[in-house]
């Protein structure tokens, strides 16, 4: 069967001169009678916008070229093909490989899908559907989704563990606490929790302004939040202004809505880091809010930076 090779026509680019060689394809490129450069092999030419394109078929795929006019010269911009292992190969010579769907999503099914790239950039949202645990592959860390959370498996050259990646870190911006009534920590505020188990940890750095009162901390629920278990261990430390040995102020484990009360502030006004760590099992979604107060309104203190809270979903 004779193959067909299309060659661009300068006078009528959409009307292509057709050549058949009766064997395979044009063995080498050249210049047609109109002075247009053409490529070897079976090639289709066309105009896309202000750029001319040529698709050159080869064994197992095709190569794409572009040119400013039908006369060429033609520049290799990429192509698509396959290898003996059945892999689909996409190649971009000049720029990026872009998957551009219409109103729907771009979905890649099956696997594993592998790309060897200097970098991979996703414009917009990237979603991984929940999947079973993949087997470890030497030299690779494999990301996958489990219960809506991003996980990855360390390759055989690593430790072989399955790691969870979710973490929410919120930092306080600093505030003066001058009331016995509890207030949210500025910069941290309300934290939305869904159904599931969460690990909670953080540090409140309180800098007293007046001796006599105590720092208070609690975690409250709102927006319908229900927990079957909530326990956070709070530890207060003190250290002298200008340095020195750190002392232990107070410590206790509190439930949801319960109050931690620190030791009385001494005359030295020693700053006091208050570390906390615990776990919440949420059965009905809602909002968790860390709040602070002072036992004596006149005995003020500042929530200093760094003060932060970290929320980590525990993924089975």
Image (cartoon, rainbow, N blue to C red):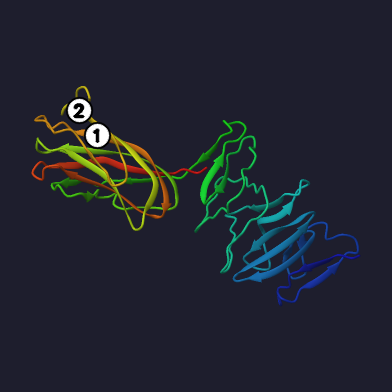
Task: Please tell me whether mark 1 sits on a helix, a strand or a loop.
Answer: strand
- Which residue corresponds to the image point at 58% horizontal and 51% vertical from the top-left? 130
254 vs 61, left or right, is left
Quarter the N terminus occupies: bottom right
Residue displayed at 60% across by 31% down: 157
Asked where in the image residue 159 lies, by quadrant, the reply is top right
- Crowdedness of circle 2 by 10 Å Cα count: few (<14), some, many (20+)? some
Residue 235 appears anywhere in the view: no
- Percent x, y of residue 295: 14, 42
Q: Are marks 1 and 2 in contact (CB under 8 Å)?
A: yes
**Can you identify the residue that label 2 sits on?**
239
Mark 1 lies on residue: 273
295 to the left or right of 160: left
Q: Nearest the camera: 250 or 80?
A: 250
Where residue 207 sits in the image (x, y, percent)? Answer: 17, 37
> Residue 298, how many percent across, how many down?
8, 44
């Amino acid at each position: 069967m004779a193959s067909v090779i299309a060659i661009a026509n300068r006078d009528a680019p959409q009307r292509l001169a057709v050549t058949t060689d009766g064997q395979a394809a044009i063995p080498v490129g050249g210049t047609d009678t109109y002075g247009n450069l053409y490529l070897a092999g079976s090639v289709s030419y066309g105009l896309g916008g202000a750029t001319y394109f040529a698709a050159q078929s080869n064994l197992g795929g095709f190569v794409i070229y572009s040119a400013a006019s039908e006369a060429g010269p033609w520049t290799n911009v990429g192509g698509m093909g396959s290898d003996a292992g059945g892999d689909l190969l996409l190649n971009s010579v000049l720029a990026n490989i872009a998957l551009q769907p219409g109103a729907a999503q771009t979905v890649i099914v099956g696997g594993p899908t592998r790309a060897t790239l200097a970098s991979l950039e996703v414009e917009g949202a990237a979603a991984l559907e929940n999947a079973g645990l993949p087997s470890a592959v030497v030299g690779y860390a494999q990301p996958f989704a489990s219960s809506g959370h991003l996980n990855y498996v360390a390759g055989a050259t690593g430790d072989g563990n399955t790691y969870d990646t979710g973490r929410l870190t919120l930092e306080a911006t600093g505030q003066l606490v001058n009331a016995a009534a509890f207030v949210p920590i500025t910069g941290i505020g309300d934290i939305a929790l869904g159904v599931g188990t969460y690990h909670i940890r953080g540090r409140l750095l309180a800098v007293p302004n007046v001796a006599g009162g105590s720092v208070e901390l609690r975690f409250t629920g709102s927006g319908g939040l229900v927990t079957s278990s909530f326990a956070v261990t709070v530890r207060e430390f003190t250290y002298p202004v200008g340095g020195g040995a750190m002392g232990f102020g107070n410590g206790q484990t509190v439930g949801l809505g319960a109050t931690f009360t620190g030791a009385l502030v001494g005359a030295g006004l020693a700053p006091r880091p208050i570390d906390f760590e615990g776990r919440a099992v949420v059965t009905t979604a809602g909002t968790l809010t860390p709040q602070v107060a002072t036992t004596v309104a006149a005995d003020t203190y500042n929530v200093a930076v760094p003060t932060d809270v970290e929320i980590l979903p525990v993924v089975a």
